[in-house]
Amino acid sequence: MLNELRTHWRSYTALIIGLLSILLLYLYVWPNVWLIRYISLAMGIFYFTWGILAHTKSKHLTKRVAMEYAAVAILGVLLLWMVTI
């Protein structure tokens, strides 16, 4: 895992910065339900896109990996949407 982090540190830095930015935006607009839902959707799209690009770059992208990123992104969006019900 450490070797993976050393090799792909730019990708993981982009992921952390992106998710932290989305988290801060989420907290900033907290009472607004519709903005939170849009931000949650943007987070899911960002995470899925990051996963596809990261695995394409490392030449390890398979259909199973893409489906896994899609499933985790959908689950994350649904969990955040449940907070706004």
Image (spheres, helix red, strand yellow):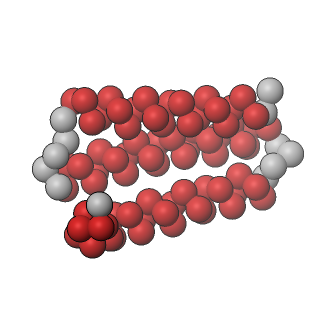
Between residue 48 and residue 60, name the one nearer to us.
60
Determine whether, in the image, residue 58 is placed left or right of residue 32.
left
Q: Position of residue 84 (x, y in %)?
A: 78, 33
Say which residue appears at 79% left-offset and 37% top-offset. 33
The residue drawn where x is 34% and y is 47% is 51
- Residue 8 in view in this figure: no
Whether residue 40 sits left or right of residue 30 in the image: it is: left
The answer to which quarter of the image holds residue 35 is top right
Q: Relative to residue 18, is residue 13 drawn left or right?
A: left
> Does 3 sit above or below residue 44?
below
Camera-nearest residue between 2 and 51 = 2
Q: Residue at x 61, y 56 (%)?
A: 22
Pinpoint residue 31: horizontal percent, then vertical percent.
86, 45
Q: Is residue 28 above or below residue 73?
A: below
Dividing the image into 4 quarters, which one contains the C terminus? top right
24 w.r.t. 76: above or below: below
